[in-house]
Amino acid sequence: IRKGEGIPCLWLGLSDPSVHVQVGQDCAVTKPDSQTSGSGGPGRPVWNEAFDLRSMDPARDLLEIAIHDRFQWPWARREMARATIPLESLNRKPIQKLKVPLLPRGYLYL
């Protein structure tokens, strides 16, 4: 998970997003943007983190991505954006870098 672009900020333009990724039962979470060495600015967080997620059924499993804002209250995580990608669509060709469109807006670069 490299970086985000155009991600909505939920609190007066301030945010501290982390990325939650899941494939089947396997999941991982990035550090919040404030705890990374990257500095992309509001709506452009930089994570530069790698995870290995295993799929038991690539033909049916989905890569589910959710970006949550932690800002100052860790117990009040709010979803900022999300995306779902069928793993089968990623297996067709080798992909080194991927630009994933997020809903309601923005992109996540993998």
Image (cartoon, rainbow, N blue to C red):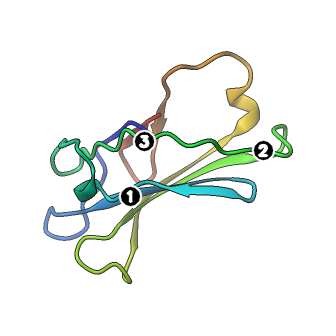
Q: Is the Cβ of the residue at disc 3 closer than 8 Å to that at disc 1?
A: no
Q: Earlier in the sequence, mark 1 or mark 2?
A: 1
Q: Between marks 3 and 1, how big is the CA–CA gap?
A: 11 Å
Q: At x 86% / y 43%, what residue is drawn? A: 57
- What is the crowding at mark 3: few (fewer than 14 residues within 10 Å), some, or many (at least 20)? some
- Which of the pair 38/41 is nearer the observer? 38
Q: Between marks 2 and 3, how big is the CA–CA gap?
A: 19 Å
Q: Earlier in the sequence, mark 3 or mark 1?
A: 1
**Considering only vertical position in the picture, is 52 above or below 70?**
above
Residue 98 placed where, x, y %? 50, 27
Q: In screen coordinates, is 53 left or right of 9?
A: right
In which quadrant of the rendered view does residue 108 lie? top left
Q: Secondary structure at mark 1?
A: strand
Q: In screen coordinates, is 102 left or right of 51?
A: left
What mark, if any, has residue 58 been given in the picture? Answer: none
- What is the crowding at mark 1: few (fewer than 14 residues within 10 Å), some, or many (at least 20)? many
Residue under pointer 3: 49
Q: What amino acid is labelled 2 in the image?
A: Ser
Residue 93 placed where, x, y %? 69, 16
- Is the N terminus in the top left, top right, bottom left or bottom right quadrant? top left
- In this rendering, the label closer to the viewer, 2 or 3: 3
Q: Secondary structure at mark 3?
A: loop
Residue under pointer 2: 55
Residue under pointer 1: 18
**Considering only vertical position in the picture, is 38 above or below 24?**
above
**Considering only vertical position in the picture, is 26 above or below 60?**
below
- In this rendering, the label closer to the viewer, 3 or 1: 3
Q: At x 34% / y 44%, what residue is drawn? A: 47
